[in-house]
Image (cartoon, helix red, strand yellow):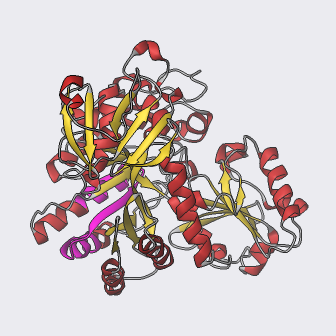
Amino acid sequence: MHTVSGGDAQAVAVRGGRILAVGSDAEIDSFRAERVVELEGRTLLPGFQDAHLHPTAGGMLGIVCNLHETASADDCLAEIERYAAGHPDQEWIHGDGWSMDFFAGGNPDKERLDLIVPGRPVYLENRDGHTAWVNSRALELARITADTPDPHDGRIERDASGAPSGALHEGAMDLVHDLVPPPSPEEREQALLNAQAELHALGITAWQDAVVDAETLAAYRTVAERGQLTMRAEGNLIWKRDRGEEQIADLLALRERGLSGRLRIRGAKIFQDGVLENFTGALIEPYEGSDNRGMSMHEPEELKRMLTLLDGHGFQVHLHTIGDRAVREALDAVEAAQRANGRRDARHHLAHIQLIHPDDQPRFAELGVVANAQPYWAAHSPYVDELTLPFIGDRAAYHYPFASLLRAGARLAFGSDWTVSTANPLPQIEVAVTRIQHPTRDTQPMLPDERLTLEQAVAAFTRGSAYVNFLENATGTIEPGKLADLVVLDRDIFDPGAGAVGDASVMLTLSEGEPVYDELT
């Protein structure tokens, strides 16, 4: 057993949903138990907590066109054709999961979609949700032509003649997305239950939903009020870029409705930039070989006003920041909010943090900002090596600087960004420790000085995420009095002879002492 509270122990006693005692086998043997689980070389940990994911999208994968298992453009086209044939009455073909490295320059074309789905509109987001692949019918319905200007927060990819070529980046996605029929309330509720079951099977007992809208909140409330929400769910209401400060009244009203059972909505989500692969991630200096510095979705002074307003109303602010300029602008905004409102226990956090300039790394600790990192991406892969590193030059030296952040005193929390990548914490922990691609493990480590110890990586997925979720007094470590949110793994992951951490699996997950996933019975 690894307590994540400063040591190991042999046994734990649970009663009434809480940890009653932690100690030696002899000490715990004195408690009468209805069930005894012998670890027999397995690992007991606090339940994992995912600090950034999209559970509704994950739970919808069984309903929409799911491209997450594809490995090439041809795979995608075959799956899209199969899905379309199996859903002849569906008005739109929509889904997600394709990868930018399947296509030259990261941009798919509409012509191949037109061949397999000629009559119905197609809208398919890529794995990171920052680019959509559409066909000619979708462009026609959205009235996107060569004369359509790019929105201020996005880009329409175009061919040599200026006509839209089939890829829409960032805010340009909304031109088509807004036409796609939304899921029904029942589908949203089932998606949450699907995601909850899948993530409990991975040892996850709490999550922070990165983006919650009014419809998703309604689904959460319904599931919670039925007593079906066994996951501790934190959530973030989305700050809409097409609205101004007047939306704060709506956010406050939604937040009031965000308390039910294990549900807590206390955050607000701001996107400050895009992603590096489509050149919308905001950089201090231009991308290599260009004068493009990416997109700040909000001008720095506007971001300061927004964050100061949200902070003043008691929101925890969750910021999407990929490029080093976006990180700097977000930290500047937190600093401005603290000057205006005074410092409080806000636990604002920056998610993704792919590039952090060395000058800004100490500012996380200075400002009390949590570094919310997605460790699975911190390794060489074709996606990174072909679509990112050639365009950032010397900035590759501070690419996902996890160890540097810890050395600078920052609090580190881990999240998956599922469905962008796997929700399984164990492969993610392995990558944080090795900086080598999983599952092939056939690459050189990326910036080996940024590797974490196994203890540090486990702590980021338990105690660190509990902190950003305001749950550290109740969960995140194995200590008497805390809630019995626990996970049992099939091996001792701290034993070097037990095999790769990413190959371990979950045998038992407890939420307040009750099994929510059980392979031991």
Q: Does residue 100 belong to the magenta stretch?
A: no
Give the number of callouts. 0
Characterize the magenta stretch by its predominant secondary structure.
Answer: helix
Judging depth in this view, the residue of 29 and 84 nearest the camera is 29
Q: Is residue 123 visible?
A: no
Residue at the limit of the structure toward the left, as seen here: 342
**Quarter of the N terminus within the rendering:** top left
Is 261 located above or below residue 111 in the figure? Answer: below
Magenta-highlighted residues: 304-332
Q: Residue furthest top?
A: 497
Residue for point 25% across, 45% down: 360
For the residue pair 470 and 226, the one nearer the viewer reads as 226
Tell me what residue is drawn at x 42 percent, y 70 percent. 224
Q: Quadrant of residue 244?
A: bottom left
Q: Position of residue 301 (x, y in %)?
A: 28, 70
The residue that appears at 47% across and 78% down in the rendered structure is 218
Residue 316 lies in the magenta stretch: yes
> What x and y, as percent, mark residue 158?
71, 63
- The image shows residue 242 at horizontal and vertical percentages of 46, 80
Q: Position of residue 309 (x, y in %)?
A: 24, 76
| Residue 184 in view here | yes
In the rendered structure, the answer to whether residue 502 lies left or right of residue 35 reads right
Q: Is residue 130 left or right of residue 328?
A: right
Is 482 on the left-hand or right-hand side of 96? left
